[in-house]
Amino acid sequence: MCVDARIVEIITYFVAAACTLGIYTILYRENRLFRLFEHIFIGVAAGYGLAITITEVLDPRWFKPMITENATIISTCESVRGWEGVSIDRHVKRVGRASIRWETDKEKMIRYTTPPPNWTDARYVKLWVHSEKQTDGSVTMRVGTKHKAGKPTAWFEKSFKIDFVGWRQLTLYLKDFWSKGELDRREVKGVYVVEFVADDALAESGVVLHIDELRYCIGRKWYWIFALVGGMLYYTIFMPRFAWMSRFIIGIFMGLQAGYTFKAFVLTFYPQIAKSLRPIYVPGNISMTLNNIIFIITLLCVLVYFFFTIEHKRPTIRTTARLGRLLLMITFGLIFGNTIMARFSLFIKRLDFLITQFPWLK
Amino acid sequence: MRVTRISDFVLTMLSRFQQVDRRIIYVLVWILIGFPIVAPHVGIRLPVLPMYPTRAARSFFEAVESVPNDKVILVACDFDPGTLGENGPQCRSVIEHIMRAGKKFIIMGLDQVGPTIAQAYAEELAKKYGYKYGVDYCNFGWITGGQMFLERMCRDLHAAVKQDKAGTPLSEIPMMKNVRSAKDIGLVVEFTGSGLLPLYIATFNAQFGVKLAQGCTGIIGPEQFPYLDTGQLSGLLVGLKGAAEYEEMLNVVGGGKRAMLPQSAGHLLIIVLVALGNIGMWAARKVERR
């Protein structure tokens, strides 16, 4: 069923307009219509919040990494783009519409030059390989990586035997790849080429190999299930018998947050404290001098006003504190003015919607 | 005797300004703000009020202009429909400026809805400026984790963010190829109605030296000026007026500039009401003394 876009637009407008006007009925007096729309808004916001938490956080960042292999396609092997020394075969295939055909007697080495560069956290490589006959030869998979500045390109290699007939899915763990020279895998910046090299025995056998769906995987992060256990500890607070367990998780997060808050406080407010120490006289700049004097007077007066441990009886203290209070009042007036501006802005937005989006006025 | 009676009558009438029914004030607000919005649709031409960009807004504009072409701008949309009236026009005009300047940008947000709203602005403006998703801009969506996440993002962006809002791995987004950490980000612009700025200051600005600029709501505006004074902020847009100032510098008429006439009308009404309220208080005191 296809609904006219114009009708959808009109219905959307009237639902939104009814919600807006329903909420604004509070301006007249407290009423049931207002409460109805208030509850609708709260319900929609809660539902939206829950849905988006599931779809944008829990599912992609917790559930999927836990139950899937977290695979990234290196090559779908459905076109020769990026490949060298191969052709496409649409008849012998395992996944999708085609596979890569490699005649080992003609090309001893094939390469793929456009792999995804970021293999962070990758644990193993998976690929489908088809052999038309059993051989004694083997293939070496070589992963070329760009090393950090100042060091040569690093290669990581792993061999596997072609001693099977038909399709077989191979899993090659990156920890089993050996590197040339003294290179640390943790320093690797990015992969730029993947090569497959046939040894002499394989090349002499003249076997034709097919490769399909080449990918690297991070693996199932099964241990993420402990996050659920940790999260559930919060809810033990509702069971008096087990309420003590909630203190573990609350304590951990309080400690973590306290550390971060302390760091943020220093990084955020220290520059402001440092900037408060200003010269009273700036040579050649009268406006800056005046500005600094006003700033310092305001700062000192407001600080004196908040010294509650000193009784504001002495004329010097009393006058300074009173001036501090006056300056605070000016600031509150400024904040109140800004608040009015902000509230009007929000009202203008709704009124603008009601008027300019009216279907027969657009 | 008669003069006294007249003055008593006037004072009594004036003292009633203190007891004006709030519903009358609401009706006046609706009329005064509604009229400038309705007028253009019924053939009445009203003037567009002149705008004079403040130093804070000009600094914001210059901060966007000064971003090198090999760096990206991070557009952090930490707002929701509750403050759309102010943050919306700010965000839209800054995205338009970024596109006009031909710079690449990333949308993200510590709020659930902000990135979706900004995506709509970007898609609308992309048609005008020929921007392509993935090549010129991308959207990370809603980000959880607060300061911890931002700090990790500054150190290794690809390790912190695995995929964009649509689920595409970052490694498959062309523009992200050379964006690896905070050193590849030339400017962070944040739009918010809440106090999230210290998170960005403590991470991007204080630890990694990335410039920051902010568009905030009018309510929190006064609290943000000390950050501008210390140089922790490179620019600041306050409320709808900030958006209008930015539109003035861009030479476009958007949601900000259009709203300045109804906004000013509302402000005038408040000034008049405050004055009348004070006159009413003065008159009531006079009546009491007599």
Image (cartoon, rainbow, N blue to C red):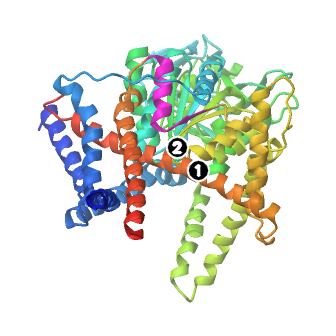
> Residue A348 location, x and y as percent?
33, 40
**Three-letter amino acid code of the residue under disc 1:** Gly
Secondary structure of the residue carrying numbered label 1: loop
Q: Is residue B129 left or right of residue A158?
A: left
What residue is pinned by disc 2?
Answer: B192
Q: Is residue A329 left or right of residue B289?
A: right
The picture quadrant where one finds residue A196 is: top right
Q: State whether residue A127 appears in this view.
A: no
**Residue A83 vertical placement versus A30 (above, below):** above
Q: Is residue B282 left or right of residue A210?
A: left
The chief SS type of the magenta part is: helix
**Residue A34 vertical placement versus B147 (above, below):** below
What residue is pinned by disc 1?
Answer: B195
**Residue A315 vertical placement versus A85 (above, below):** below
**Three-letter amino acid code of the residue under disc 2:** Thr
Secondary structure of the residue carrying numbered label 2: strand
| Image point (41%, 47%), residue name | A343
Q: Label for residue B40?
A: none
Whether label 1 touches label 2, CB < 8 Å: yes
**Which residue ends up furthest to the bottom in the rendered image?**
A241
Around disc 1, counting alpha carbons within 10 Å, would you say few (fewer than 14), some (14 to 19), or many (20 or more)? few
Magenta-tinted stretch = B236-251
